[in-house]
Image (tube, rainbow, N blue to C red):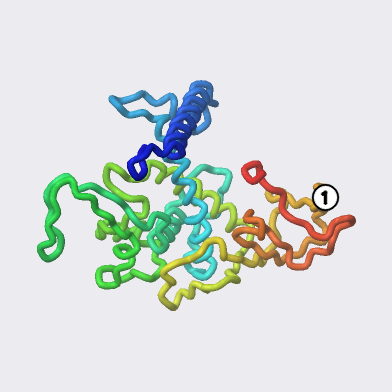
Amino acid sequence: MTYGGCVNPAIGRSSVYRTHAFGIFFDRLYTYAEDADPHSLIGTLAQLPAHGSVDAVGQVPHWLFAFDAAGMAALRAVAVLATHPEERSRCETGELEQLQLRPFLRACVLESVRLWPTTPAILRELTADTTFGEGAWFGSGSSVLIATPAFQRDPDLLPFANDFVPDIWVDGRAEQYPQLVPFSAGPAECPGRNLVLFVTSTVIAHLLSMMRLELQSTPLLDRHRPLPATLNQFGVVFRAARPLRFSTVDLVSSAGRPAPSAGVPEDINLCAKSARGRPAIRPRSTPPAPNSSRWHRAPTSLER
């Protein structure tokens, strides 16, 4: 690597480190896949026959990349569902023990990504000479940047541009608008699309079955007004109108002891993250426990 005619050793070391780190990651990934639980997702994937140059296990990093945005899409979908009771009532929240696709909930996640894209720009390379609009010509090999919010919210082309209309993903209307690409499209479509939609719709189904959420933060996402162009998921705050099932969300005191379920209020504020940057559940008026000034949620294994 050179910088101003001189070798930049810092950049060179960084490149070598990334290459080494990727090598370690893939070695561990393939080792894990060879001895994975056959009933797990990666175990099933590893059993699929390879076709030509297709590397099924090599798609796993793309899944992980997709999950970086899955939480954002799910949280935004829950926020808009909290202010759209008609759509909320149609969500498939029954038979949670059964594996199912939940088409309407999947549509809600797709619609949240259309409204607030987690990937606002898509890069593509033209494979042929192309003329755009009124004579703008670009040669083969040109790079093109597609600003997805401009296309997915174009009021001149989309009658539902700034509204929450998940039905377009169910009744086929979305297919009439090729500019709607919440997970990209074509040969470079996100490989994690179906996995993310399955997981997020399942998580939302469980969440909505446990409590009725009311959006407390702004913007309020009024169903009678155009939805805002952006939605910061870290600022979203809900109020749970029914008690949580604390068997699935453990509460512990700051001293590390399990918190008693007695005395936990029915109204609980849920926010996207605490002051330390972690997802948080904040009781509205929980009495302080002995030797502890406040109760807080136990961090998951991913947060430790």
The residue wearing badge 1 is: 255
Q: Quadrant of residue 267?
A: bottom right
Residue at image position (44%, 32%) is 16
**Residue 19, percent across and down?**
43, 31
Tag count:
1
Looking at the picture, tell me which residue is in the foreground, 187 or 130. Answer: 130
Decide if residue 185 is in sight here: yes
Left or right: residue 129 compared with residue 158: left
Task: Specify few, some or many for label 1: CA neighbours under 10 Å numbering under 14, 14-19, or 20 or more.
Answer: few
Q: Quadrant of residue 266?
A: bottom right
- In the structure shown, which secondary structural element does the residue marked by tag 1 occupy? loop
Looking at the picture, tell me which residue is in the foreground, 37 or 278. Answer: 278
Q: Amino acid at mark 1?
A: Ala
Looking at the picture, tell me which residue is in the foreground, 66 or 199. Answer: 66
Residue at image position (60%, 66%) is 237
Residue at image position (59%, 55%) is 207
**Residue 20, percent across and down?**
47, 29
Query: The C terminus appears in which quarter of the rendering?
Result: top right
